[in-house]
Image (tube, helix red, strand yellow):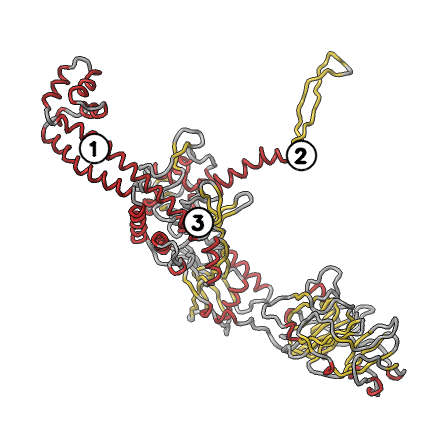
Amino acid sequence: MARKKKTEEAVKRPDNPNVMGLRAEVLEQPITETLEVNFMPYAMSVIMSRAIPEIDGFKPSHRKLLYTMYKMGLLSGGRTKSANIVGQTMRLNPHGDAAIYETMVRLSRGYEALLHPFVDSKGNFGKAYSRDMAYAASRYTEAKLDGFCQELFRDIDNDTVDFVDNYDSTMKEPSLLPTTFPNVLVSANNGIAVGMASNICGFNLREVCAAAVARIKNPKCDLREILLAPDFPSGGELIYNYDEITNIYETGRGSVKVRGRWRYVKDGNLIEIYEIPYSTTTEVIIDKVSELIKAGKIKEISDMRDETDLSGLKLTIDLKRGADPDKLMAKLMKMTTLQDSFACNFNILIGGNPKVMGVGEILEEWTAWRTDCVRRRLYYQLGKKKDKLHLLLGLQKILLDIDKAIRIIRETELESEVVPNLMIGFGIDQIQAEYIAEIRLRNINREYILKRTQETADLEKEIGELEDTMNSPRKVKALIVKELEDVAKKYGKDRRTAIIYGDELEYEEEREEIPDYPVTLFATKEGYLKKITPQSLRMSGEQKLKEGDSMVMTVETVNSAEILVFSDRYQVYKARLSEFDDGKASLLGDYLPTKLGFDEGESVAGVCLPGDYSGFLLFAFENGKIAKVALSAYDTKSNRRRLTGAYSDKSPLKSILCCPEDLDVAAYSTDGRALVLHTALLAMKTTRSTIGVAALTLRKKSLLDRLIPLSETRIGNAARYRSKSLPAAGAILKESDQEEQQLAMDL
């Protein structure tokens, strides 16, 4: 679709030539031009300058804030008002004060969103684990840089990184911060750009440094043995999955499961939850538990409240008498965000290009970038030492005749000729002459000059070592390794998120307890189902049915039993009777297509109670074939509600029978014939979509009408309708053997 642009042009009005009017002209702009001129610059700006972190682990907003605080002297000085920091940051960040302060809050120690916070905060900065605990305004809080930030700015003044103009070109700012460790893997970060996103989980600092060292020494090392798993500031327990961790480490995508930690307080019969997953909040958990209690799905809780205080997070659950805390928490882990997944998407800007990388590739990119930083630092230091050596060599020359230097300066009439005369007198260059000319009068003595010139040998040695290091990749890597080991030793902490394995989660696999009691099940031809308790059934009258509907199944069972509902579109829906409300005879019951979420226009073809899935199902098709399918074919390990391909679609289905064991059945045709056969004659199949075997031989224009257990028919002499082999045509029904009404659930 093209965008239209209106332009105005002055023209003479036809009704009055002396009066000028305006004529509007509409110009069309191709959508491709709109995308290229308007949308693409915006998308690139969001990707490169806002949402996606770079190899130093920071977004531009983080970097601008931290560098501003560094230039304010807040790394070694005392705290200052947050409002002051926000105001100063606006010189680099053109966003409003609210956005800048929100960035600062997330980086603060008080907010608890990072394993190693960068801002040492004082005051109310809110909490990452609370949705409603708001942070105080910037005029009430104070902050400074945490001591940990020394590793972010180390050697930043030694030309280790590039500096660029700020948005109005009034000052310079670093394009990256020269972090001495892989901060991109230590500090959790997430962002949503245009057409892409990034979601990076944090890892333990010690493990990250050890992994970086191991990768430098051996690029083929197994990172899973060193970098165990993600580590979250909120703690909790990470459920270790080898395949998922491998996938994340290799591709940069995947998810990990994290759950909260709790303890049972026997004195008081209550549960205290003191750590929750990083991806949720206390309010979300409480709201979901309240919803489950109202829905009657959790009955063991009498009260739940948030008792978070200065000592940390705490959610308290009061239990009812006799409640099992382990089973309750297993339910809550399954039904609330007390167990949640963290989706990883390691999308990072490398040289201005977004790239999704695994952990190993990230460490390689960081090592390459850090190597460049170290080389730049060495080159800068080498240049400084060479400059100083150059000056000292000039100073050494005047040591031979200090009086001559004084005489040259004293006898020079013009000040501008002092430096040229020194250059001529001692054979030195202008820089050396300028340095000598600036020496104070009190320092023109032999002792001072000897001390300065004694540094020459040391400088020459240091310069030689620096050049040797710069020309040796091995020594550069050794410097990086030394820095990583120092950071891990000085700032390393123990893991906050514990790692647990599948064999430690036995109680999680326990199925939810379902109240079990006897019920009577009623199913109708139109697809209505009633579940009535014996007490209610004794007090009931006649069963209420929809006009034109009829009862096709009445069976006594229990509330915990499973039910299979087949549809006319070759699908089967699985459910438990406990999912249906107890009904009454005076009600129509649950309409199965609505209750089970049938597709539009889909209707019920048959209902079966599979029990322990030890029997079989008989499918009678219009073409005279009967399929005998083992019930075990419908027993799935996963709790899937719907299975497609429930039976063959080669011929229209007429009847479904659920049989726990072999029995005699009667097949009726539309031309008034019947065939009695024993189901043992039919071969059992485990494939649900089997077309079956030919059972009833049909005459021209005749079809199979229905299949019914012999015990439910009016046939008196079954031998009349039997045949020695299949298929068979059966015999014409006697009037006394004909059915008064259809008993099976037919289509």
Which residue bears the numbered disc 3?
A: 126
Relative to residue 286, is residue 176 depicted above or below?
A: above
Q: Which residue is mark 2?
A: 2
Relative image position of residue 236 (x, y in whole percent): 43, 60
Viewer-nearest residue: 446 or 737: 446
Q: Secondary structure at mark 3?
A: loop
* Residue 541: percent from left, percent from top: 77, 76
Find out whether the residues at labels 3 and 2 contact each other: C-beta distance under 8 Å.
no
Q: Which mark is residue 108?
A: none
The answer to whether residue 487 is above or below residue 572 is above
Q: Residue at x 84, y 72 (%)?
A: 703
Which of the two residues, 615 or 297, is positioned nearer the viewer here?
Answer: 615
Name the quarter where the N terminus is drawn. top right
- Given residues 714 and 621, the one toward you in this image is 621
The amino acid sitting under disc 3 is Gly
Q: Nearer the viewer, mark 3 or mark 1?
A: 1
Of circles 3 and 2, which is in front? 2
How dense is the environment of label 2, judged by Cα within 10 Å: few (below 14), some, or many (20 and up)? few
Q: State left or right for residue 394 relative to residue 256.
A: left
Q: Which residue is mark 1?
A: 389
Which residue is located at x 9 percent, y 29 percent? 446
Left or right relative to 210: residue 450:
left
Q: Disc 1 and disc 2: Cα gap in Å?
A: 68 Å
- Mark 1 lies on a secondary structure that is helix
Q: Amino acid at mark 1?
A: Leu
Who's the residue at 53% across and 67% down the image? 331
How much space separates mark 3 and mark 1, taking CA atoms?
A: 54 Å
> Residue at horizontal 11%, vertical 20%?
404
Of badges 1 and 2, the one in the foreground is 1
Q: Amino acid at mark 2?
A: Ala
Mark 1 vs mark 2: which is more N-terminal?
Answer: 2
